[in-house]
Image: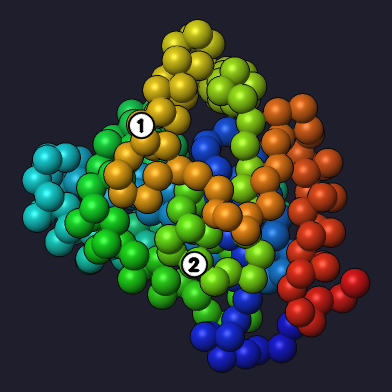
Amino acid sequence: MLSVPASQAPIITVDGPSGTGKGTICSYLADWLQWHFLDSGALYRVLALAAEKYGISSDDEAALVNLAKNLNVEFKVAEAGSLVNVELDSMTVTDEIRTETCGNAASVIAPIAEVRQALLSRQRAFHQSPGLIADGRDMGTVVFPDATLKIYLTASAEERAKRRYKQLKEKGINANLRDLSAAIAERDERDSTRAASPLKPAEDAIVIDTSTLDIDAVLVNISELVRNTVPGLQK
């Protein structure tokens, strides 16, 4: 795709809870289209990690807002389907932010309205030519409401817990499937009922339930949506 002004560059948002395949789908799209990439969920995890390192409490809103405004974060897709590399101040923190502890900490600070506002302009700054793939939970509803294509991936808490359990076991990490399922259900409830940017599909989003679909089937579906929606792509 030819370079266009940033304000006119297309945006594809992929929202939904964790464990639905968002990361794999988004890295595939970013690699295929050679567009910029924003992992907003990782952004909150990076903030949670930075807060821990600097000794900032989750209830110190002023300090969290100041920290959010000064985060230097980059997302780099090595290849399609691979885990996105996350850098904070040029230091790789990909593994550190993927722990359950960091994820839970991010979920606690994410509902704070002032923190979300501080990160909003930072997220929108990722919108550059030739285009942007935005992975998150409120990309299509709040951050990029005028996105070219909005996708919302979902799956049952039980299925997502199984996927997470498999990932952890493959890494040699002990886990309890029942505890994982309960934690995911609790996080879903917290994220979907929060006052600030609750987790929900945008009214014009295309919802895809991945509970019974493998990643290849989801990719075929979404690739076709992209070809039929984004101007200038080869059919």
Q: Residues within 10 Å of mark 2 (few under 14, many from 20)?
A: some
- Residue 111's place in the image compared with 121, above or below, is above
The answer to whether residue 29 is left or right of residue 48 is: right
For marks 1 and 2, the one nearer the N-term is 2
Q: Visible in this render: residue 170?
A: no
Q: Which residue type does callout 2 highlight?
A: Phe
The answer to whether residue 66 is left or right of residue 171 is: left
- Quarter of the rendering occupied by the N terminus: bottom right
- Residue 24's place in the image compared with 102, above or below, is below
For the point 12% across and 40% down, the residue is: 59
Q: Between residues 138 and 29, which one lies in front from this camera angle?
A: 138
Q: Position of residue 85 (x, y in %)?
A: 51, 53
For the point 58% across and 55% down, the residue is: 203
Q: Visible in this render: residue 47?
A: yes
Q: Which residue type does callout 1 highlight?
A: Arg
Q: Position of residue 162 (x, y in %)?
A: 62, 19
Where does label 2 land, which residue?
144
Q: Judging from the image, what secondary structure is the residue with disc 1 in? A: helix
Q: Give yes or no for contact between labels 1 and 2 (Cβ–Cβ under 8 Å).
A: no
Q: Which mark is residue 190?
A: 1
Res. 202 image quadrant:
bottom right
- Quarter of the rendering occupied by the C terminus: bottom right
